Image (cartoon, helix red, strand yellow):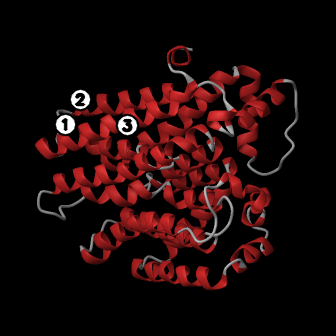
Amino acid sequence: MFFNSIVPLPFYTPLFYNFILILVILAAVHLFNNGYDIGNLKKKDALSISLLFIIILYMGLRPVSGKYFVDMRTYSNDFERYQLGGEIRVSNDIVWHLFMKFCSNVISVKMFFLLCAFLYITPLYIAAKNWLSQDSYFLFLMLIASYSFWAYGTNGIRNGIATSLFILGLSYSNNRKLQLGYMILSYFVHSSLIIPGAAFTLSLIYKNSKHYLIVWLAAIPLSIALGGFWERFFISLGFGDDRVSYLTDNQYADQFSSTGFRWDFLTYSAIAIFAGYYFIIVKKIEDKVYIQLFNIYVTANAFWILLIRASFSNRFAYLSWFLMALVIFYPFFKAVFFKDQQKVLALTIIGYFGFTYFMFLIN
């Protein structure tokens, strides 16, 4: 494949982050000088579509490697087992395994990963278009610039596709059947989506964001005070099938940079909490879509806070983090909140990707 021949494996991930860094800098400079306007509609669509295809091809045509992309090798082994006639051995995430088995009969493993990249990234593009139409490029770029984007496209592939389908479902707020259809599909791709799915259901029933914030704040002392009680409690409920071992099994500790109460990741999560507080409570935004996005994020993140000490708790954190770009950037395109708002947006874009780039540099 083209990328395989010109990009050595050790440079595959760094090249991605530096490419996005260039795009973020260009976007920030443009916002400072020209505001949101990036030309006529055709030019805006061309930017978004070009970014879509570049990332799909670059991510999807990467070499198969367990060293650099971790679980990619596991997916490859499962695919090859299905190619040899292996049967589906699990009952959970059945849509994913049916999809993998079908693909194993008609395409190569390389084309399978390309298709996975398409299914991961395209829903984000469509969702950004559904929500923002002409301004979708900036939101789409921020979804790609998110902290967990690359990892869940190259490592946690199944989870990444499931969350993208969930976001796509959220974007069809005017079509409840289609919305629920995508969300149910996301669950059968990766059953951990039951957490944001439950948060979505709650957001339909109860809409007071102030109370969601109170619950989120209460989750912090409850997690500090009760320690491992929450892990044992959710295990007793049968939560998470095979993933429940992440909650208590220390064999995973060496695969997560540190365990214990993660104040660093709590601070990161709180950035979106503060954004929602500012736009909803202080500025009193009335956009129903945004209020629901925020309430879902707060609920899923509060769940993670209760499990924050668990090995691999970053996988539970991702069940809220995949919404972070939406919570932070969506309001900028719905109303005016700041003087020179385009400059505030530019600085926010730099700060948002700055964290992602910093984590890339230190890991």
At label 3, the amino acid type is: Ile
Q: Is residue 122 left or right of residue 1?
A: left
Q: Which residue is mark 2?
A: 43
Q: Which residue is mark 1?
A: 38
Is residue 5 visible in the rendered structure shown here?
A: yes
Find residue 271 and report its image quarter. bottom left
Return the disc, 1 or 3, that comes first in the chain's sequence.
3
Q: Position of residue 62 (x, y in %)?
A: 57, 26
Q: Tally the numbered discs.
A: 3
Instruction: State the CA–CA distance, disc 3 to disc 2.
Output: 19 Å
Q: Is residue 289 left or right of residue 151?
A: left
Is residue 292 visible in the rendered structure shown here?
A: no
Residue 343, compared with residue 316, is above or below; it is: above
**Secondary structure beneath disc 1?**
loop
The answer to the question of whether label 1 and label 2 lie on touching residues, with beta carbons closer than 8 A, is yes
Q: In the depicted view, which residue is nearer to us: 94 or 239?
A: 239
The answer to the question of whether label 3 and label 2 lie on touching residues, with beta carbons closer than 8 A, is no
Residue at horizontal 63 percent and vertical 54 percent from the top: 184
Residue 213, compared with residue 165, is above or below; it is: below
Q: Position of residue 100 (x, y in %)?
A: 73, 34
Residue at horizontal 26 percent and vertical 40 percent from the top: 25
Q: Which residue is mark 3?
A: 20
